[in-house]
Amino acid sequence: MLKLTGYGLKEIIKKLERRRDTVKQQFEESLYFFQGETKLTEANDTANRLSHKYEELERNIALVQAVQAVYNTSLTITVQGEKYNLSHAIKLLGGAERIEKLWQKAAETGTPAYSSYDRVRVTGQEHAKRSILISTAIERAEKASTFVGALRAAIAVANSTEKEVSLSEDMIS
């Protein structure tokens, strides 16, 4: 058992993924050899050894990700009066950021200089009108931005929480 934060788990996963990627590269190189420099049996042994190492790293990554999922579901955060487990909050963040962008775009004034759609009906030269006031769009963009900021802050605090996790020191070193 180790005491780790969410950030610590994320770093362990990154470290294992870098190792896995290096082993993959070495494995791919081990599939070829020059006659006289290496014997075929040595090349086969190297490929087999690297394949086993690659598989071990994949299993370790999956294990740490499973531990991370348990960690993320075990912590509860409150954002603007609503409770979420950390896992749910992390998943909400992407959508909240996209909603924020939508309202920020809606709050922009004018038409882009090279717009392919200028919102004009050719037959009567009728121009489309805004369906939402810019002030309303700004208000909603600010509200969405406030939620995104509060969500990010709560996620950061939760990810800083140290908890005992089911990992051994030798598995992650």
Image (cartoon, rainbow, N blue to C red):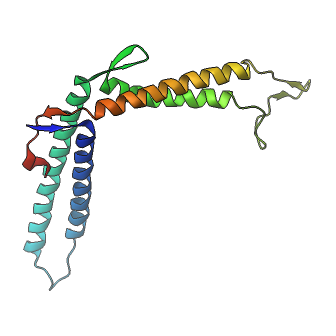
Quadrant of the frame with the N terminus: top left
Point out residue 114 in the picture as x, y percentages from the top left corner. 77, 44
- 126 versus 108 height, above or below: above
Q: Residue at x 26, y 28 (%)?
A: 72
Query: In terms of image quadrants, where is residue 156?
Result: top left
Q: Residue furthest top?
A: 81
Q: Tell me which residue sits at (56%, 21%) in the image.
A: 143
x, y percent for residue 123: 90, 25
Q: Is residue 11 left or right of residue 164?
A: right
Which of these two is toward me, 171 or 50?
Answer: 171
Front position in the image: 40 or 170 = 170
Single out the residue that lies furthest toward the bottom.
36
- 106 or 82: which is nearer to us? 82
Tell me which corner region of the image, top left, top right, bottom left or bottom right, holds residue 119: top right
The residue depicted at 92 percent of the width and 23 percent of the height is 124
Task: Choose between 51 and 88: the one closer to the eye.
Answer: 88
Residue 167's image quarter? top left
* For residue 122, above or below residue 14: above
Q: Position of residue 26 (x, y in %)?
A: 22, 66
Image location (x, y in percent) of residue 168? 8, 43
Q: Is residue 37 left or right of 113 when viewed as pictured?
A: left
Residue at image x 77%, y 35%? 111
Please state if 33 lies on the left or on the right of 153 as rendered.
Answer: left
